[in-house]
């Protein structure tokens, strides 16, 4: 089977590397087409970028730097032009197209389907949701891309629900049968089998950007109140960003000042993992979270997680094997009670973390994608 990946965001995440590398074990021939504008900067894994074809066994990479950046505002034109160009570089007959975003990549797949009748699947990401919310006139194009696809992939239940709010019930009914939820995966690296249960106090941790929607200030207030209720809680904060000064000021003015530490963001994976393992609970009740791979990393390290209800990773966990709590963020006392329940029953939550995290290993996620390809 030949899979043609159209991946306009290839340089933005290692997700695509894990997926493409992982699919090798099934023996697929893979062709990765990355449309770029002429001035677009590129980075890992191909920092020494040129426009030549880069190939390995059963893989062909084509980085097509063609249009200038102003064509980003001409979505239909841009995707149509790149659909004509991809046909020059790649023999797309007898292949399945995997479009990794709805608009930038899915638009190309749509035009190829119209001209060559090539089957395609399309993934919807948060950037697509932002675009359709901002430019409602793209809704017709989005619906046509989705309607002509063989499968529609969302990485979370919350993203699916938010995205489908843009369409009528009739349109949703037309699309529902082909929608699949396939989350992002994590490598085996994150699995930690030996997490100790805290004896006398709980160490909360946050690692990430200091953005308002991450609700770090709200988390600090919750942990202050847990200490007020007699629990011994520390909060270790790692990151950088626009809210850093506000976070520092809030900590400096807290009567539990000594229970908080703020540290610079670390990027080395070993250091990030060690930070998880050295703490007990990962807290990020983030609003507008597409998925939140950090939750899975923390779970794999043996930490129960605190996340936001109806956002990000919410919807993947059941009550039989709880791994954390979902906060409302607009009901402080209720959220505080949820955290207290987590502390009171910590061992019950903690024992489920690895069992659930292992379901998100790339080996399992790849099987989901293989089933989608095989159905087509």
Image (cartoon, rainbow, N blue to C red):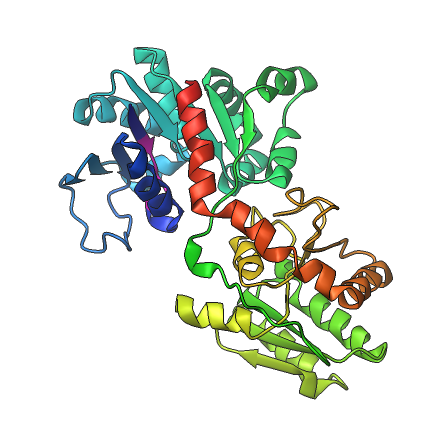
Q: Quadrant of the C terminus?
A: top left
Task: Determine the residue positioned at 55% across, 40% down.
Answer: 130
For the record, the magenta segment spans 5-10
Is 39 left or right of 330, judged from the image as shown?
left
Viewer-proximal residue, 75 or 111?
Answer: 111
Q: Position of residue 182 (x, y in %)?
A: 52, 36
Task: Determine the residue positioned at 61% across, 47% down.
Answer: 313
Please determine whether, in this image, residue 102 is positioned above or below residue 156: above
Is 246 left or right of 60, judged from the image as shown?
right
Viewer-proximal residue, 277 or 164?
Answer: 277
Q: Position of residue 242 (x, y in %)?
A: 55, 68
Please determine whether, in this image, residue 345 is positioned above or below residue 256: above
Q: Is residue 337 magenta?
A: no
Please determine whether, in this image, residue 270 is positioned above or below residue 213: below
Residue 249 appears in the rendering: yes
Marks counted in the figure total 0
Q: Is residue 8 magenta?
A: yes
- Residue 55 occupies which quadrant of the picture? top left
């Amino acid at each position: 089977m030949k899979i043609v990946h159209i991946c306009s965001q290839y340089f933005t995440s290692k997700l695509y590397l894990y997926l493409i590398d992982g699919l090798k074990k099934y023996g697929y021939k893979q062709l990765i087409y990355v449309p770029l504008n002429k001035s677009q900067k590129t980075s890992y894994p191909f920092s020494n970028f040129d426009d030549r074809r880069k190939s390995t066994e059963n893989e062909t990479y084509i980085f097509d730097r063609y249009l200038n950046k102003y064509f980003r505002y001409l979505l239909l034109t841009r995707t149509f032009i790149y659909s004509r160009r991809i046909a020059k570089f790649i023999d797309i007959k007898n292949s399945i197209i995997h479009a990794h975003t709805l608009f930038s990549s899915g638009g190309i797949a749509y035009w190829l389907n119209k001209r060559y009748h090539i089957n395609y699947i399309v993934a919807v990401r948060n950037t697509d949701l932002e675009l359709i919310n901002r430019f409602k006139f793209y809704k017709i194009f989005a619906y046509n891309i989705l309607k002509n696809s063989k499968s529609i992939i969302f990485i979370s239940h919350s993203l699916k629900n938010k995205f489908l709010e843009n369409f009528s019930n009739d349109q949703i009914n037309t699309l529902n049968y082909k929608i699949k939820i396939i989350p992002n995966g994590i490598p085996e690296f994150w699995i930690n089998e030996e997490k100790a249960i805290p004896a006398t106090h709980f160490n909360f941790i946050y690692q990430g950007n200091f953005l308002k929607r991450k609700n770090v200030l709200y988390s600090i207030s919750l942990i202050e109140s847990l200490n007020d209720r007699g629990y011994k809680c520390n909060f270790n904060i790692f990151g950088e960003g626009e809210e850093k000064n506000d976070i520092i000021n809030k900590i400096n003015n807290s009567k539990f000042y000594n229970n908080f530490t703020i540290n610079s963001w670390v990027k080395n994976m070993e250091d990030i993992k060690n930070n998880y393992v050295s703490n007990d609970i990962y807290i990020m009740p983030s609003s507008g979270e597409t998925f939140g791979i950090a939750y899975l990393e923390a779970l794999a390290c043996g930490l129960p997680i605190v996340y936001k209800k109806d956002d990000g990773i919410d919807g993947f966990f059941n009550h039989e094997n709880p791994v954390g709590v979902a906060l409302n963020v607009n009901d402080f006392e209720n959220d505080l009670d949820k955290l207290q329940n987590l502390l009171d029953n910590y061992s019950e939550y903690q024992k489920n973390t690895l069992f659930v995290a292992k379901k998100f290993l790339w080996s399992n996620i790849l099987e989901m994608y293989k089933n989608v390809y095989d159905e087509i």
